[in-house]
Image: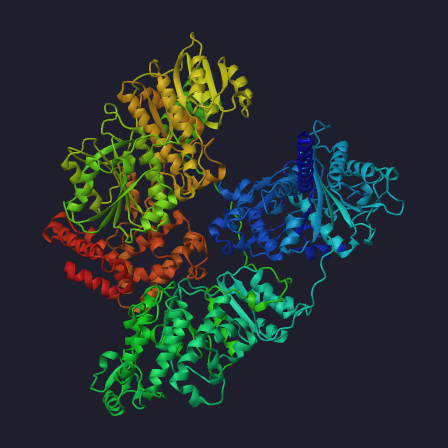
């Protein structure tokens, strides 16, 4: 029985598992065939078509968009010749053109005019149509940044662009869209000729079904930048003379070229339904195939077309009879159309009812053959046809082609418009595209599933916000106009739906407007500007909320809001439910009693704040005026609601109980002008000239009379904030002591400690310092203030304090509460305050809204004239003839017999080429050296230093002595001992220290034990990676220094180094780029560091010399320098040649293959090329065959070089008769572009594992072998760094040190730190960016020549890179000084470009500015900045540059930033910092800085004054510095500043933040005496 039970249980489990497996298989199969929803479409096509609706109008009305050649592209005007095949001519000058293809809103996409002109119009068209596609789907494009959204774009033409820029690269067409919108799904450009867009669609569907993307853009674009296609097809007689495609017609006489752009936004159908996206149509299935070996490369293949149709039907689970219509390829060619028609007859034409023929047409008859956009144009046409229930006609058909046997199947041409009736199944259509390349595509689309009937529109019960935004002021006006025109013609669009769609389905851009409307008429009036909408520009900066005090109360306050908004009502009742009957009563006198006023104001303000909070409004700071400060303290989390209520009630009750009397008077005078007398107190300082006096009536009146200024007596029951409040304080203190106080969770700006009960007692009696509070908030960068209270009291006071920020009231005693609240919120939103309007618009549904009103200008690149290599044309022509070995030309030039040149000319040509090559690569050679530098002064500097130590070394002598040295210099040292730290735990420990360190010193690298999980990392290296990440997580901005011992050496040929520690130096080079402000530097100590070395270490850490890569040695300090290392044409130490066996790891990849070809050409007998896949690696067999043809034996070996056993087996298999003589270790793994904080330790280790482990295994296993060369492929990322490549740079630094270690032990080694190669390392887009910054990729043949040179020279370590220092150095040094380059003369010259000029433009500008008033000076400098920016970016004039717009938003990059610095330096005669646009992020801010620097303003921002100070010191001679004791005085200031930090007082940074520029420099003046 027991066995039966077991068997029964087993069968039950097996049955359940089988059912589960079947269910999962069914789900997988369903996923693989799930229909794809088209949720939006966008397009540009001939005939002025700029939307799918306009395309439908074109085809439904039977019009075409064929016109003459465009006249705005610089095409020759003499192209026409009626005779076909005339060279260089075309007999057809008509087609379907986008005559405005050059028009583009570059500013919208943050592209400068110069870059726009260099960017292929195909890229530009896709940018605009991509934005429109998302808008049409009701998706805010900005919300997709970082999302898995794919871009699949078909492109045929790659003939635009000059100078090889990214603007003309096909790969960038899709990538540009992904980059501009921040999309992180696949970005794929497809070129299969005419079928490109449907193939792109096919790939997009696969990506969606496979889960790679959640949304995908798919389509294609075609713009013919040149007439080459017309000329080419004219030679083949393939064009219709009139440019019109007569698809499937007897009159067909060739194709007509067209242009266009079309995009579909796709989503899986299930996702579209779940996300509430409207489904326009469904793509049921798609298929692609190839013609294969047909009767011609470009000839169509009928059987292949049949097969692709059948494959699509099978994929969709459909029969041919279930498809109603076909949008055919139909190009109008005599050969192609009949073949396609026969394929359709053989597939769709079979098995159909007689009364239901397959209807066939082609949109090419309307717009021409749009090539890469052809297929998507057919999709858009048929989606619209399905939605309209109409089959539109195909044009230019005189009669069906007589070449086709139409009786072979039930297929009919659409020669007229026909209704598309409901036939019992969803309307379906097939769309075909057959590429000139032989790639065929077929897609089947069908009618969308019935949607849920829409709910009836909801009527609005009050004003609602309709939000509109744009990138510029002009675009905003155009947006308003476009919305008005659209909505005026759509009365069915409900107001609530429009409002909801405007805030939920549109991007919020920088220029904003809000129309508050309670009716459709009011909305249209606002859009037409009959009633001015609320408008503004986003102004960066924190938001502060100000809570109003007593005097703002009014009868009925909050009643409308209470009835309209449940959130307000609930919060009001919770705060003080009983008070509302007094607040809403009829007696103003009763409400004015302070016992009632204070609870009423408190309840109103708390309720209003909770309502704002429910709408997503989050303040950065809070502040309050008198009683308003209690409401602010409650919402900040200092007081619970019950405790705050208790405090307010007691305060009001005790004040009310005081005897009546006293007076309060507001006077228009500064506090400094008021002389108090007994009986008078200052109740409030509300502004620079706004003070409230309080106290005994007679005394107050006497002070007022003596002032003689405007005075207003306040209507109050008592003299608040005066000595007359003192009788209540004792009892109030007793009540307060029973209340709990907490630290604020939102910063609360006050003049005291709000968690101290005494503060609230004094609060009753002492002065309200509103002016100080507002000034403090302004100093913290606040740009927008919202007044939270029942009236607009503080708004007016704030506007008297400053014009540099906006003060916005949310209520006004004379205006309707709801509209006033929404007006204030709308005003705040236009300034950039986040507001979630959706809760206000509950019941609203998405409705169609107009797409963005792009503000286009025309950009079209002029053809570039090639540069010549010689300024002497005769010289250039002579050497050109030599290199071409043009015997005849040279003989004529030399007046000799051509036969006389026969033997010498090839030799001269070869010598010339060899010389040029040698000269070129000689200029690429650099090496790293160590230069002695002066020791910093032995100064004390107080502050807190965090010293992070491996726990195993915590008590080691060198650790204790290092800590002691820092302490000796007056620092407080906090030692943190760590062991294999976790990132989160370490960050928490750093935070728990409770103070911000002045510096961080890591000794973690000293732990050289292998990491337990990652053997190529030491514990110290792994812990250092974690430390960098943890410091970032803990928001520690202090400079981080790392200490190594023996990682570097002055003489690496004799002194061994530790590669494991050297790895940290490569990491450092990248961190100095990625974290320029937080990175301190690297210091290497000798292993037996003495006290003198430690003193030098302490001096380095506390100095401000700027050196960041230092060796501390007994005989001094040495700084790392990059210097040139040319051979100068001198012969090498040897002549290396490959002999025996040469091993190349990574030998089948891009670089490895170049090396193998070179080695074979040099006569290598036997090459062993390794990769992980060996012979199965892509292209490996072909490479081996190619090398064998040179007589080289090739072994393709699959070997993981990180596996020691596999390496050992590989070496053991090398034949004894051809022993291993040369090793080239080029294997390695690339790192994705990411900051160190984005990498896990696993990923960091994996990047370097093969490179390091492989090198170590080869080094160890070949320790006893005699080698001619042991070459390690390193990278410049270990020398000068490469942003986002910390793991890669670290691994390469290890290789450099390994070469030094081998050489010190007497073994050969050559490590080459390469710049980028043109193959294997960078793609075309990255190569263009590198060229632009001055670090172009090197041609592979020249790089290989540099390798030969290094081997001949027997270099141990060499840097090979093509660097244009004039471009590279200013960009590289932009974020911080780079002492590494100090010894390069070209760098010094490049960085001296911004040096001050004597006289010249700078003097002229100074003379022009001197007599002008300050406002005019500022205008002149702003014009200078704007004009300079305009010239750099390619704008027509400076007026096109918005003063308040950030430089990165204007289209600046690092190169243009340097150019601006150089231009302004020349114009002002000043040496300007390379960080100019980072320190001053807008033209207006930069102009203000220049004003402070150039004009004697007596003020200016702190950075301006610091720049002046730096400039003054930079002009001092050494004698002047010594005579004036400048160094000593500066050090004294540093000591004074850091003492503040060390004493735990207010940080200097905070004091600077809180003080004005005058305060800061008064402090410096006192210390420096300058």
Residue 1566 x/y as whole percent: 16, 62
Residue 408 x/y as whole percent: 87, 37
Residue 889 seen by the camera: no
Residue at image point 58% right, 68% down: 841
Please say which color scheme the image uses. rainbow
Of 1551 and 226, which appears nearest the observer?
1551
Residue 1225 x/y as whole percent: 40, 23
Report which quarter residue 1348 is drawn in: top left
Residue 1387 x/y as whole percent: 30, 40
Specify whether 227 is left or right of 635.
right
Of 1532 and 530, which appears nearest the observer?
1532
Of 1465 and 966, which appears nearest the observer?
966
- The residue at the far front in this view is 1
Q: Relative to residue 1155, is residue 289 depicted above or below?
A: below
Residue 971 seen by the camera: yes
Specify whether 264 is left or right of 245.
left
């Amino acid at each position: 029985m027991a066995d039966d039970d077991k068997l029964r249980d087993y069968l039950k489990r097996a049955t359940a598992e089988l059912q589960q497996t079947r269910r999962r298989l069914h789900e997988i199969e369903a996923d693989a065939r799930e229909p794809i929803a088209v949720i939006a479409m966008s397009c540009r096509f001939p005939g002025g078509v700029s939307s799918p609706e306009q395309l439908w109008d074109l085809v439904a009305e039977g019009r075409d968009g064929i016109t003459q050649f465009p006249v705005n592209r610089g095409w020759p005007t003499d192209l026409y010749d009626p005779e076909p095949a005339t060279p260089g001519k075309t007999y057809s000058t008509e087609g379907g053109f986008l005559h405005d293809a050059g028009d583009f809103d570059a500013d919208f996409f943050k592209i400068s005019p110069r870059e726009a002109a260099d960017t292929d119009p195909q890229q530009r068209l896709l940018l605009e149509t991509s934005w429109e596609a998302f808008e049409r789907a009701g998706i805010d494009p900005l919300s997709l940044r970082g999302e898995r959204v794919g871009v699949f774009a078909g492109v045929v033409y790659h003939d635009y662009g000059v100078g090889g820029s990214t603007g003309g690269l096909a790969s960038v067409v899709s990538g540009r869209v992904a980059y501009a919108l921040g999309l992180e799904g696949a970005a794929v450009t497809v070129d299969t000729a005419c079928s490109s867009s449907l193939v792109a669609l096919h790939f997009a569907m696969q990506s969606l079904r496979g889960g790679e993307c959640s949304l995908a853009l798919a389509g294609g674009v075609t713009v013919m930048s040149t007439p080459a296609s017309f000329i080419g097809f004219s030679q083949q007689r393939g064009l219709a003379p009139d440019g019109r495609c007569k698809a499937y017609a007897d009159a067909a006489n060739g194709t007509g070229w067209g242009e266009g752009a079309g995009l579909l936004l796709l989503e899986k159908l299930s996702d579209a339904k779940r996300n509430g996206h409207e489904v326009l149509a469904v793509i049921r299935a798609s298929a692609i195939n190839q013609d294969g070996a047909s009767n011609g490369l470009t000839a169509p293949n009928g059987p292949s077309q049949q097969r692709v149709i059948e494959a699509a039907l099978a994929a969709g689970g459909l029969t041919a009879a279930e498809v109603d219509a076909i949008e055919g390829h139909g190009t109008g060619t005599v050969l192609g159309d009949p073949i396609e028609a026969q394929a359709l007859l053989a597939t769709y034409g079979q098995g159909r009812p007689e009364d239901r023929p397959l209807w066939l047409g082609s949109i090419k008859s309307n717009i021409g053959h749009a090539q890469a956009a052809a297929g998507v144009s057919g999709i858009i046409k048929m989606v619209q046809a399905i939605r309209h229930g109409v089959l539109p006609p195909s044009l230019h058909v005189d009669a069906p082609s007589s070449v086709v046997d139409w009786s072979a199947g039930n297929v009919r041409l659409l020669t007229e418009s026909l209704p598309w009736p409901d036939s019992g199944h969803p309307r379906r259509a097939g769309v075909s595209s057959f590429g000139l390349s032989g790639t065929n595509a077929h897609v089947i689309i069908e009618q969308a599933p019935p949607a849920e009937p829409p709910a009836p529109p909801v009527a609005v019960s009050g004003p609602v916000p309709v939000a509109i935004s744009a990138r510029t002021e002009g675009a905003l006006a155009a947006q308003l106009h476009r919305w008005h025109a659209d909505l005026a013609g759509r009365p069915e669009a409900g107001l609530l739906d429009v409002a909801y769609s405007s805030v939920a389905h549109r991007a919020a851009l920088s220029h904003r407007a809000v129309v508050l409307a309670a009716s459709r008429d009011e909305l249209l009036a606002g859009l037409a500007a009959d009633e001015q909408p609320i408008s503004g520009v986003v102004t960066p900066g924190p938001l502060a909320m100000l809570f109003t005090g007593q005097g703002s109360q009014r009868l009925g306050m909050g009643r409308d809001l209470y009835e309209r908004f449940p959130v307000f009502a609930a919060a009001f009742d919770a705060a003080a439910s009983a008070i509302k009957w007094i607040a809403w009563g009829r007696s103003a006198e009763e409400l004015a009693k302070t016992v009632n006023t204070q609870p009423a104001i408190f309840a109103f303000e708390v309720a209003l704040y909770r309502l704002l909070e429910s709408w997503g409004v989050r303040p950065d700071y809070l502040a309050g005026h008198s009683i308003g400060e209690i409401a602010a303290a409650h919402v900040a989390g200092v007081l619970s609601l019950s405790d705050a209520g208790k405090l307010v009630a007691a305060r009001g009750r005790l004040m009310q109980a005081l005897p009546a009397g006293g007076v309060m008077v507001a006077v228009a005078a500064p506090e400094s002008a008021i002389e108090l007398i007994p009986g008078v107190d200052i109740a409030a300082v509300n502004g620079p000239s706004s003070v409230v006096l309080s106290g005994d009536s007679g005394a107050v009146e006497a002070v007022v009379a003596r002032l003689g200024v405007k005075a207003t007596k306040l209507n109050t029951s008592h003299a608040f904030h005066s000595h007359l409040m003192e009788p209540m304080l004792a009892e109030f203190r007793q009540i307060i002591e029973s209340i709990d106080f907490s630290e604020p969770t939102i910063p609360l700006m006050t003049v005291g400690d709000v968690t101290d009960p005494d503060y609230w007692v004094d609060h009753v009696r002492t002065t309200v310092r509103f002016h100080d509070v507002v000034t403090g908030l302004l100093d913290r960068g606040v740009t927008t203030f919202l007044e939270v209270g029942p009236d607009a009291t503080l708004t007016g006071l704030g506007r008297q304090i400053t014009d540099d920020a906006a003060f916005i009231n949310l209520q006004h005693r004379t205006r309707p509460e709801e509209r006033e609240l929404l007006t204030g919120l709308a005003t705040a939103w236009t300034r950039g305050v986040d507001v979630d309007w959706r809760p206000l618009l509950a019941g609203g549904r998405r409705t169609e809204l107009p797409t963005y009103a792009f503000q286009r200008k025309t950009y079209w690149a002029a053809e570039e004239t090639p540069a010549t290599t010689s300024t002497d044309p005769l010289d250039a022509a002579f050497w050109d003839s030599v290199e071409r070995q043009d015997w005849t030309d040279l003989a004529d030039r030399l007046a000799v017999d051509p036969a006389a040149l026969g033997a010498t000319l090839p030799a001269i040509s070869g010598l010339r080429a060899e010389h040029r090559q040698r000269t070129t690569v000689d200029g690429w050679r650099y090496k790293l050296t160590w230069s002695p530098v002066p020791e910093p002064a032995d100064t004390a500097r107080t502050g807190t230093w965090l010293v992070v130590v491996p726990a195993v070394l915590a008590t080691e002598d060198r650790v204790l002595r290092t800590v002691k040295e820092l302490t000796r210099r007056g620092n407080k040292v906090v030692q943190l001992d760590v062991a294999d730290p976790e990132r989160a735990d370490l960050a928490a420990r750093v935070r728990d220290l409770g103070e911000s360190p002045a510096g961080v010193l890591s000794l973690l690298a000293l732990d050289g034990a292998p990491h337990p999980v990652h053997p190529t990392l030491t514990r110290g290296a792994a812990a250092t990676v974690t430390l960098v990440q943890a410091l970032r997580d803990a928001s520690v901005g202090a400079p981080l220094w790392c200490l190594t011992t023996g990682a570097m050496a002055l003489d690496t040929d004799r002194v061994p180094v530790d590669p494991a520690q050297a790895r940290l130096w490569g990491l450092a080079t990248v961190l100095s780029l990625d974290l320029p402000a937080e990175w301190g530097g690297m210091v290497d100590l000798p292993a037996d560091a003495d006290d003198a070395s430690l003193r030098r270490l302490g001096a380095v850490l506390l100095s401000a010399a700027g050196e960041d890569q230092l060796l501390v040695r007994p005989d001094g300090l040495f700084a790392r320098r990059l210097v040139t290392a040319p051979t100068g044409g001198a012969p090498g130490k040897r002549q290396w040649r490959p002999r025996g066996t040469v091993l190349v790891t990574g030998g089948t990849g891009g670089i490895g293959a170049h090396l193998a070809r070179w080695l074979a050409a040099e006569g290598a007998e036997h090459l062993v090329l390794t990769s992980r896949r060996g012979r199965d690696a892509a292209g490996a067999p072909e490479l081996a065959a190619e090398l064998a043809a040179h007589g080289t034996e090739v072994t393709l070996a699959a070997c993981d070089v990180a596996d020691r056993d596999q390496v050992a087996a590989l070496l053991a298999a090398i034949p004894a008769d051809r022993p291993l003589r040369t090793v080239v270790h080029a294997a390695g793994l690339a790192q994705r572009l990411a900051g160190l904080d984005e990498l896990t330790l696993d990923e960091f280790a994996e990047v370097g594992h093969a490179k390091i482990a492989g090198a170590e295994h080869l080094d160890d296993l070949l320790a006893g072998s005699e080698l001619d060369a042991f070459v390690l492929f390193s990278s410049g990322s270990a020398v000068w760094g490469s942003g986002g490549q910390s793991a890669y740079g670290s691994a390469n630094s290890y290789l450099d040190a390994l070469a030094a270690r081998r050489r010190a032990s007497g073994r050969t080694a050559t490590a080459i730190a390469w710049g980028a190669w043109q193959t294997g390392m960078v793609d075309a887009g990255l190569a263009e960016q590198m060229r632009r910054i001055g670090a172009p990729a090197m041609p592979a043949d020249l790089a290989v020549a540099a390798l030969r040179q290094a081997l001949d020279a027997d270099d141990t370590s060499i840097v090979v890179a093509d660097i244009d220092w004039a471009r590279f150095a200013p960009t590289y040094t932009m974020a911080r000084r780079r002492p590494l380059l100090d010894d390069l003369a070209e760098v010094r010259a490049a960085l001296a470009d911004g040096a001050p000029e004597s006289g010249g433009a700078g003097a002229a500008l100074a003379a022009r500015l001197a007599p002008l008033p300050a406002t005019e000076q500022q205008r002149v400098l702003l014009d200078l900045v704007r004009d300079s920016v305009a010239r750099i970016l390619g704008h027509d004039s400076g007026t096109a540059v918005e003063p308040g717009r950030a430089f990165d938003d204007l289209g600046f990059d690092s190169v243009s930033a340097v150019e601006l610095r150089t231009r302004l330096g020349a114009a002002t005669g000043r040496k300007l910092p390379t960080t100019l646009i980072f320190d001053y992020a807008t033209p207006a801010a930069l102009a203000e800085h220049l004003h402070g620097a150039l004009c004697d303003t007596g003020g200016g921002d702190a950075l301006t004054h610091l720049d002046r100070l730096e400039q003054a010191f930079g002009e001092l001679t050494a004698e002047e510095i010594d005579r004036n004791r400048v160094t000593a005085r500066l050090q004294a200031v540093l000591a004074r500043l850091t003492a503040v930090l060390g004493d735990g007082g207010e940080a200097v940074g905070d004091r600077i933040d809180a003080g004005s520029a005058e305060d800061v420099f008064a402090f410096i003046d006192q210390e420096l005496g300058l």
